[in-house]
Image (cartoon, grey):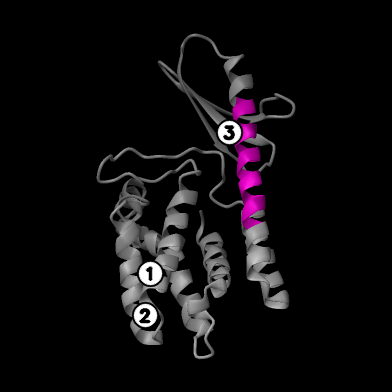
């Protein structure tokens, strides 16, 4: 996902973390807790600095090592060390919430077409399911709305729990749209197609697809509700 969405997700996780009794004492720094969760949500994308060495290096390495299995523990450990010492948080609870934030970052990135090397070092294969856009208005908007409601009503479990349930339903819907596009595309292609690649677009009911032929690559946009190409 994009940086703005990860920022909103970090704030939402910080709000949800307030249900933990370890973060309910009067001396708890909400600013420190929010800072820790936002950093945890942004940490895997630190490889964005590779853009300074050129887009080629950035594209080849972004969402690689920093999204790998070892870093699912390395990032939370570093965040706990810094924020736990600075704000005197319960280290175990801070580590667990940081793990949740980092793991959620890597998990949601898998659903983009770009994908991640989430199984590294066991596999360097890029895992990208492609049915969620890098920036999705519903995902971003639902987090912003939930954070605003939490600030007004201070019911984190109900508000963020409802948000996450709605997001699960949304992901299922987007997956079903991708399947619909794939089925309608398969009916139209010929035997010369070697591979079909489908990814989401900014249009809610459409997906972009590429048919890899032996000699060329054909890319179009298909509307799942009409079956029309663009």
Mark closest to the chain's N terminus, 1 or 3: 1
Circle 3/circle 2 CB separation < 8 Å: no
**Is residue 3 in view from this perspective?**
yes
What residue is shown with label 3? 208
Measured as percent of width and height from the top left, residue 230 is found at 66, 29
Question: Viewer-proximal residue, 130 or 175?
Answer: 175
Distance in Å between CA atoms under marks 1 and 3: 39 Å
Regarding mark 1 in the picture, which secondary structure is present there?
Answer: helix
The segment highlighted magenta reads 163-181
**Is residue 50 in view from this perspective?**
no
Q: Residue at x 40, y 15 (%)?
A: 214
Question: Viewer-proximal residue, 206 or 155?
Answer: 155
Q: Quadrant of residue 87?
A: bottom left
What residue is shown with label 2? 84
**Mark 3 closeness class: few <14, some 14–19, many ≥20 residues within 10 Å:** many
Distance in Å between CA atoms under marks 3 and 2: 45 Å
């Amino acid at each position: 996902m994009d940086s703005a969405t990860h920022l909103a997700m970090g704030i939402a996780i910080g709000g949800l973390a307030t249900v933990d009794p370890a973060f309910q004492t009067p001396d708890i720094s909400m600013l420190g807790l929010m800072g820790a969760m936002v950093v945890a949500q942004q940490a895997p994308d630190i490889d964005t600095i590779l853009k300074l060495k050129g887009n080629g290096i950035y594209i080849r390495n972004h969402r690689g090592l920093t999204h790998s299995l070892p870093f699912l523990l390395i990032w939370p450990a570093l965040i706990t060390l810094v924020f736990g010492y600075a704000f005197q948080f319960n280290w175990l609870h801070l580590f667990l919430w940081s793990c949740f934030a980092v793991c959620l970052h890597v998990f949601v990135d898998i659903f983009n077409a770009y994908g991640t090397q989430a199984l590294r070092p066991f596999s360097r294969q890029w895992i990208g399911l492609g049915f969620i856009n890098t920036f999705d208005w519903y995902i971003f908007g639902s987090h912003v709305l939930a954070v605003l409601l939490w600030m007004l009503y201070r019911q984190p479990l109900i508000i963020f729990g409802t948000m996450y349930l709605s997001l699960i339903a949304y992901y299922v819907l987007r997956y079903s749209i991708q399947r619909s596009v794939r089925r309608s595309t398969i009916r139209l292609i010929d035997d010369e197609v070697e591979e079909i690649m489908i990814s989401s677009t900014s249009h809610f009911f459409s997906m972009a697809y590429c048919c890899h032929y032996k000699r060329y690559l054909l890319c179009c946009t298909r509307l799942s509700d009409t079956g029309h190409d663009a």
